[in-house]
Image: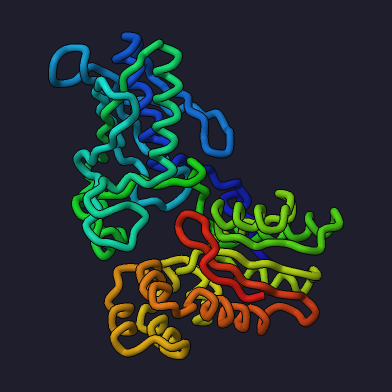
Amino acid sequence: MRDETPEQSAPLRSGYTTGSCATATSLAAARLLLTGETSDAAEIVLPKGQHVSLRLTFCRLAGGESGTQAEAGTIKDAGDDPDVTHGALVFARVRLRAEPGVGFHAGPGVGTVTRAGLTLPVGEPAINPVPRRMMTEHLTELAVACGYGGGFEVTIGVEGGEALALKTMNPRLGIVGGLSILGTTGIVRPFSCSAYIASIHQGIDVARANGYRHLAACTGNASEEAMRQRYGLPEIALIEMGDFVGAVLKHLRRAPVERLSVCGGFGKISKLAAGHLDLHSRVSSIDLAQLAEWAGEWGADSSLQASMRAANTSQEALALAHARAVPLGDAVCRRARDVAVGIAPAGVALEMFAIDRVGNLVGSAL
């Protein structure tokens, strides 16, 4: 009999991404400059519309001429997720400028992009697109509310971030000097295999109970949006599977549907194509040599395959293949679908989609 202890049954606590922390602290620092108002918390709106308040550890004028620069900081709370940045101080320093808009800079503990293949150009601070958008939207709204016509220079830092980054994939990816400021939803979901898988099963069951027979299992927000745009599926038919594609496919044996569309980032779909059912980086890795070999089956010559093996990321390898008219995205999706068909029950029409980092479809198998 399974031991149901209070620790096992207690719900896990969610936390906030470094992107949310950066947004809250930059907003508080900018507000201090424009209004003179200090506070011990900052309320922000997350990408999906939730209003949350993050407690600040400080909010004060800083360096330079009085009144032209301010800083605010918060302690990153990742909830019950084993996040490398949990407990770290994330801070923003904001300076006013004459030109409208927002400029971003890497402070201490935040990395700089030095290699191609990432979502940001070489030389840019490793502050990802969604956190940049969050900060820009909040600061723009503040400027309008205050009747301010200028812009902001925002520097984001993480105390001890350079050392923490050594525990991540950043050095291998060419992000030098610190961490990346991440987040697509603003919320860190606590990692728990059993809890997450249970939520996947529940999502499938609820969709079936409400009469939906075409579901889309997606790895995240961008893949959900791709499936929503392609098929017009309502939220109830979009199953957020994260990295647990195996949990979806196996559950269909007990709760079958007529049609399942699986959609994820190209790198994650390539892991499925290689036979991995848990797509998390702690369990499975992207095999660039395998991608090059598959490209060879579709016409890539030895020179292109060598370039793909030496690529920084799977996205860079994909771009190299597509530049030479090698349909690597489709090839990977076909292999991934074959793996999925071998696990799901007969009678489920399976299709596979891969997207790039901005949500564009780069491959399919229908």
Q: Is residue 282 left or right of residue 33?
A: right
Residue 99 or 260: which is nearer the viewer? 99
Residue 116, picture quadrant: bottom left
Q: What residue is at 40 percent from the left and 67 percent from the top? A: 315
Residue 291, picture quadrant: bottom left
Q: Is residue 48 left or right of residue 147?
A: right
Q: Position of residue 270 (x, y in %)?
A: 48, 75
Q: What residue is at 77 percent from the left and 82 percent from the top? A: 346
Give the colour scheme of this rendering: rainbow
Q: Position of residue 10 (x, y in %)?
A: 60, 47
Q: Position of residue 150 (x, y in %)?
A: 31, 19
Residue 136 in the image: above or below residue 357: above
Q: Position of residue 169 (x, y in %)?
A: 31, 62
Residue 143 or 3: which is nearer the viewer? 143
Q: Quadrant of the C terminus?
A: bottom right
Q: What residue is at 68 percent from the left and 67 percent from the top? A: 261
One can see residue 345 in this view? yes
